[in-house]
Amino acid sequence: MNLENKKTIRIMEVCGTHTQAISKSGLRYILPDYVKLLSGPGCPVCVTHEAYIDGAINLLSHDNVILATFGDMLKVKGAFSSLSEKKSKDNVITVYSPEDAVTLARKRPEKKVVFLAVGFETTAPIIAATIKDVYENGPENLFFLTALKRMDPILRFILSDDRNKIDGLICPGHVASVLGGDAFRFVTEEFQIPAVICGFEAENVKKGVYNLLDQIEGRSSVSFINLYRGCVSKSGNKLAKAFMGEIFQREDGYWRGIGKVSNSALVLKGKYKRLDAKNEFNISEETKVRPSPCQCSEIILGLKAPYECKQFGIYCTPENPMGPCMISSEGACSAHYKYGRVSFDK
C-alpha cells in the first residue's frame, strides 16, 4: 500500500478528558501518518466568550460583590484583562463546586456572591440542582452568572462547515452519560459520518479510533456505536435531564472565536431568573475583542492542530498563555504541550 497517496483521515474528539487521554497515551504516534486526530470544542473554559469574562470583571467594581469561580477561569482574558489581573485579596474566591459557593454566601451574608457557572451538559445538572435549592432555601445573597453550553448545536455547526472535513467523531463521553447515546445519533444519521462513544482510558480511546478507521476505510459499514455502555445508556440520566429542563431554557449562545451559535446556551428561565446575575447587575453581553495572534478559534473548530500554530510552545506556554486553550488543563494546547510538543510532524 502506498501510504503517500492515502487521503488524510480527520478524526475529531470533543471532550477535554479525551483530549488529555489521547495526548498522554501517545496515540498519535502509533497511528499511520495519514490519520490526523483533532480536538474540537470540548473545553468549556476555552469556549467561554470574552464578553462573559468582561462582565465578571465589571462586577468587581461593586464593593459588595464576591466572585466564586473555578481556578482555571482566573487567567482567561476578556477583551483586555483577566480576573487574576483584576482581583484583590478577597473579592475573587476559588471554589471547587457550586456547593462551595453556597457555603461562601452563607458565611458572608453582608456580600452578594456571584458564582461563575461555566460548563456543558456535564456540569449543568449539578448547577441546576444547586439553583433550585438556593431558590427554595437560600441564601438570598447568592447569584449565578451562567455560561453553560449545549454540545448538539456546536457539533452541527462544525459538521456543516465546508472548511472542516471531519471523517469520524469521538462523541463526548461525559455529556453522553447525561443526555444518553441517542442524543448523538444525528452525527451518523444526518451527516453520514461514523461516530463512537468510548471511555477515557487509553485502551478505550484506542478502541474507539480503530473502530472509526474500520468504518472510514470501508472494512465495516458506517454506523453509530456506543462502546461505553457501562456509563452511557440510550436515554441518559433522567433525573439530571429533568433538573436541566426545569431550571434552564435554550437561547443563542456566544462562543469564543466562533461567535453566536443558535440555541447553544442554557440560561435561567421563569421564576429562577431572580437568581440570574445578568438581571441583578444589568450585565451586557457586548464586548470589544482586540486582534490576537492566538489561533484558539481555529483549533477549537478543528481547522488546525495546536502544533500548527506559530505561537505554540515558543511565545505561548502554560507560564505565558496567549489563549484559553493553553490555560485550561482540558485545553488542546495545554495537553499537547504537557504530553509531547516536540517532534510533532503530523
Image: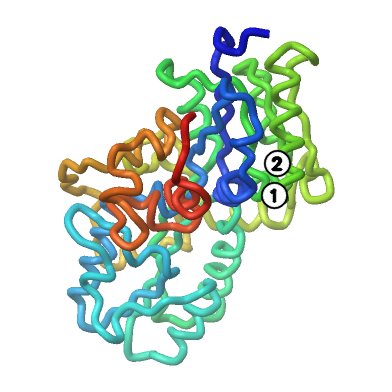
Residue at 60% across, 36% down: 29
Marks 1/2 in contact by CB < 8 Å: the verdict is yes
Q: Quadrant of the N terminus?
A: top right
User: What amino acid type is highlighted by mark number 2?
Assistant: Val
Q: Is residue 298 above or below residue 168?
A: below
Residue corresponding to mark 1: 200
Would residue 275 be seen by someone viewing this image from the given angle?
no
Dot 1 alpha-carbon crowd within 10 angstroms: few under 14, some 14 to 19, many 20 or more: some
Residue at 50% across, 18% down: 165
Residue corresponding to mark 2: 205
Residue at 46% across, 27% down: 157
On screen, residue 129 versus residue 314, left or right, reads right
Residue 292 percent location from the top left of the image = 20, 43
Q: Give 88 or 343, whichever is nearer the viewer.
A: 343
Would residue 258 be seen by someone viewing this image from the given angle?
yes
User: What amino acid type is highlighted by mark number 1?
Assistant: Phe
User: Quick one: SS at disc 2?
Assistant: helix
Q: How many marks?
A: 2
Q: Give 233 or 112, whichever is nearer the viewer.
A: 233
Residue 78 percent location from the top left of the image = 24, 55
User: Quick one: SS at disc 1?
Assistant: loop
